[in-house]
Amino acid sequence: MTGTPVKQRLVDAALDLYDERGYEQTTADDIADRAGVGRTTLFRHYRSKEDVIFPDHDRLIAAVRERLATSSADTAILAVTEAVRLVLLSYVEEGDRARRRYAITSRVAALRDREIASVARYQRLFREFIAGWMGPAPADALRAELMAAAVVSAHNHVLRRWLRREAADPAAELDAAMARVVQLFAGETGGGSMVLVLRDTRDPEQVATAVRQALKR
């Protein structure tokens, strides 16, 4: 592990120990020992043994909030879509660590509850942003709540597919899923057809083909 950043060493140690011994049987001291650091070092980076394997949600929430804050009424939907993509790509960049975490949280109720609480933070942030964009009327508040839930559900659906190795191109799948969310709420966002142009590494003709196919639906 020489040369590996301390935080990554702690994550890998925790994942290994949770697999080998089980979550309940693993202590913070066990994780620190396996990573080759002291207990104080672990708690300098993480508040608890649960925190070790989870993404830095505080950092991600701040990045999402920052992206949303740069938008205007005309670019609000694009901002939401790009903010959701930002979260997805952070998991994809983790690669195997994200998949190992998914396997562990799927079988440990305490960790699964922690993940659900984290999801609620993102949904609340999107709801507040969408509500501010739509307006203060009670009907608008309900639409904001529903749209925020749809946004988070679209992200989680694609993320789970990628974690189970069912999505070869999760970013493209998320774009398609978000287009469906926009379609569902077209009446609340001005009606008509809407095309979201996001950063894309594909050949321009491939992008144009995808747009044409989406408009036919």
Image: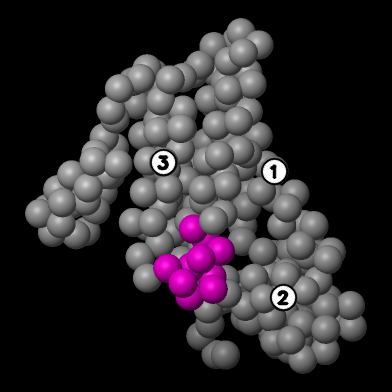
Image quarter hosting the C terminus: top left
Residue at screen point 69% across, 43% down: 120
Residue at screen point 62% across, 52% down: 57
Name the residue type under label 1: Ala
Q: Main secondary structure of the magenta part?
A: helix
Circles 1 and 3, Cβ within 8 Å, touching? The answer is no
Q: Is residue 25 magenta?
A: no
- Location of mark 1 (residue): 120
- Seen from the viewer's position, the closer of residues 206 and 132 is 206
Alpha carbon distance from label 3 to label 2: 31 Å
Tell me: 21 left or right of 194: right
Q: Is residue 163 magenta?
A: yes
Name the residue type under label 2: Ile
Q: Which residues are magenta?
A: 158-167
Q: Picture quarter containing residue 171?
A: bottom left
- Location of mark 2 (residue): 104
Mark 1 nearby-residue class (10 Å; few <14, some 14–19, many ≥20): few
Answer with mark 3 or mark 2, whichever residue precedes in sequence: 2
Q: Picture quarter containing residue 173?
A: bottom left
Identify whether 183 is placed above or below 98.
above
Identify whether 190 is placed above or below 43.
above
Name the residue type under label 3: Arg
Tell me: 195 left or right of 48: left
**Residue 35 x %, y %:** 69, 85
Alpha carbon distance from label 1 to label 3: 21 Å
- Seen from the viewer's position, the closer of residues 61 and 131 is 131
Give the secondary structure at mark 2: helix
Q: Picture quarter containing residue 67?
A: top left
Which residue ends up furthest to the left in the rendered image? 205
Answer with mark 1 or mark 2, whichever residue precedes in sequence: 2
Give the secondary structure at mark 3: helix
